[in-house]
Amino acid sequence: MSRKDRGKKTSNAAPEKKAVIKKIQDLAKKFPIIGILNMHSLPAAQLARMRGQLRQNVEMMMCKKSLILLALEKLKATHKNVENLEKILPDMPALIFTKDNPFAIYKTIKKNKSKAPAKAGQLAPFDLIVPAGPTSFAPGPVLSELAQLGIKAGVEGGKVAVNQDCTVCKEGQPIKLALASMLARLGI
């Protein structure tokens, strides 16, 4: 490298990454409305259903957050309020581009929202409660597993039954692996 070239900035980014940034910029030019979705913990089936319903009205772009930030930085020159999008960018973002009413799009997305099984390490979206009543479990080691999680249970009619409603995880707390497994087995 010559002395002349040492001070110049060069881009060693992969062509695929440059293409993603270019596509985001092109979509932003084509569509007047840009929105952000948080894709964290979104089940694939729910994403597919949502994409199918929005396909006519929305162009969706999912890629790494760093690439979205780079694209938004480049869009600041031509688009107003792009810095507001940067401030609210979640950990696993997706960009949506549309010409339609954003409130109608939001309504469609909200309609497709459904509950999914809790995953270990995920923050509880609300208080997780195991309701009192019978379970499908036969008596055995499951009684001690429930007791370790602080769930009072006994045997009724040859099946394990939870004696009283029990809050097993408060809203905003991380869900432990054993609890996530038990909630899935209980169908909660």
Image (cartoon, rainbow, N blue to C red):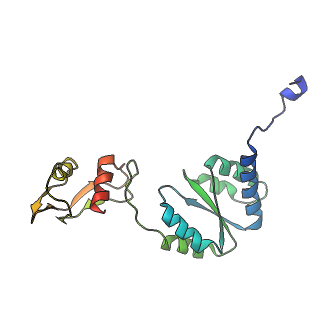
Q: Which residue: 20% across, 62% down?
A: 165
- Depicted 177 relative to depicted 95: above or below: above
> As rendered, which of 56 and 95 lies closer to the eye?
56
Relative to residue 72, is residue 149 drawn left or right?
Answer: left
In which quadrant will I find the N terminus?
Answer: top right
Q: Which residue: 54% across, 74% down?
A: 108
In which quadrant will I find the C terminus?
Answer: bottom left
Q: Which residue: 28% across, 58% down?
A: 185
Relative to residue 39, is residue 169 drawn left or right?
Answer: left
Residue 82 figure quarter: bottom right
* Visible residue check, residue 182: yes
Q: Residue furthest top?
A: 3
Q: Position of residue 40 (x, y in %)?
A: 50, 55
- Depicted 119 relative to depicted 27: above or below: above
Q: Position of residue 121 (x, y in %)?
A: 39, 47
* Visible residue check, residue 162: no
Q: Position of residue 45 (x, y in %)?
A: 49, 65
Q: Position of residue 141 (x, y in %)?
A: 17, 49
Q: Which residue: 73% across, 62% down?
A: 27
> As rendered, which of 154 and 174 lies closer to the eye?
154
Residue 125 figure quarter: bottom left
